[in-house]
Amino acid sequence: MGFKIAVAGATGNVGREMLNILAERDFPADEVIALASSRSLNTEVSFGDKTLKVKNLENYDFAGTDICLMSAGGAVSLKYSPAIGKQGCVVIDNSSAWRYDSEVPLIVPEVNPEAIAGYKKKNIIANPNCSTAQLVVALKPLHDFAKIKRVVVSTYQSVSGAGKDGMDELFNQTRAVFVADPIESKKFTKRIAFNVIPHIDSFMEDGYTKEEWKVLAETKKILDPAIRVTCTAVRVPVFIGHAESVNIEFEREITAEEARNILRDAPGCQVIDKHENGGYITPYECAGEDATFISRIREDATVENGLNMWVVSDNLRKGAALNAIQIAELMVNRGLLKSR
């Protein structure tokens, strides 16, 4: 006997990816329920070789459901997740709604699996921001070896991080450029086709954006509150795959070769780092892959014990759907859920 799993937000980019990954990884589910708003009622979505009809999240009874993979946005999660948790169903939430709640664990299974023990306080587990997830997977093994003092990260984030509307806008603007049609910007603050935008999410009083603040706060919560982190988040005209330029300052000496060897053996990491044309990974190549890819590892001579590296991952998978399902697998493997 297996588990009963609900996917809330099943018609969105991440929800559909969750259904794909549940099937790909043969998650021990006896039943999978696709949920969305009333607007999507009876819409059909794929689950392996099956087709599921979407049910209404608003009136779905979660009694008897073991896990709800929530990917319906922060406002929806704030409204429904506490009640779902009280019905005995564990919510694994992909939004930012619960990430900074001290009673909700924020989990990347390769990095801080032990933190999952705190899920019982609210029956909610938070999935990190897509940029944070790939970053901490790469940082964790290096932190264990040489202890990180400071991280400077610049992100190059694909439009799929802004949902289907973001992908549609890049497609439509790119087509408009070639046929000389007017270019409309609705989802993004400036034209995204053949451009980059140094602005993701809303601006805060200190000049950082909310997206940049998420990387700071979540890295500290997941990895180590003593690490100093600064970030610049940039939207780029790429459909899938986030890239990051990462500069790290360590307490202890670490060479580029030591870093390569450590990362080659680290869970979730794949090192592609040759000093030749094409000897690195780009977002295009990481799409559809589960790993966090690390390239361009080199020593930074401007600081003591410094390294630079290039980190790339599929933001819809490790940055969202895959990480959520890995959390569910972690619960099963640790015996935190009992099959019916």
Image (spheres, grey):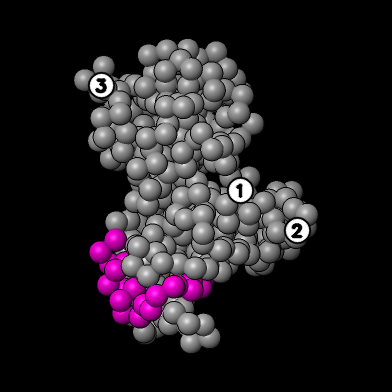
Instruction: Give the residue number, with chain letter if any, for mark 3.
Output: 339
Q: Which residues are magenta?
A: 245-266
Give the SS element for disc 1: helix
> Whole-percent x and y of residue 55?
49, 19
Kind of residue indicated by mark 3: Ser
Q: Is residue 251 magenta?
A: yes
> Whole-percent x and y of residue 9?
52, 31
Q: Earlier in the sequence, mark 2 or mark 3?
A: 2
Q: Earlier in the sequence, mark 3 or mark 1?
A: 1
Residue 265 appearing in the image: yes
| Front of the two marks 2 and 1 | 2
Q: Is residue 39 above or below residue 153?
A: above
Give the SS element for disc 2: loop
Mark 3, Cα crowd under 10 Å, few <14 / some 14-19 / many 20+, is some
Mark 2, Cα crowd under 10 Å, few <14 / some 14-19 / many 20+, is few
| Front of the two marks 2 and 3 | 2
> Whole-percent x and y of residue 184?
76, 53
- In the drawing, does residue 154 fall left or right of residue 319? right
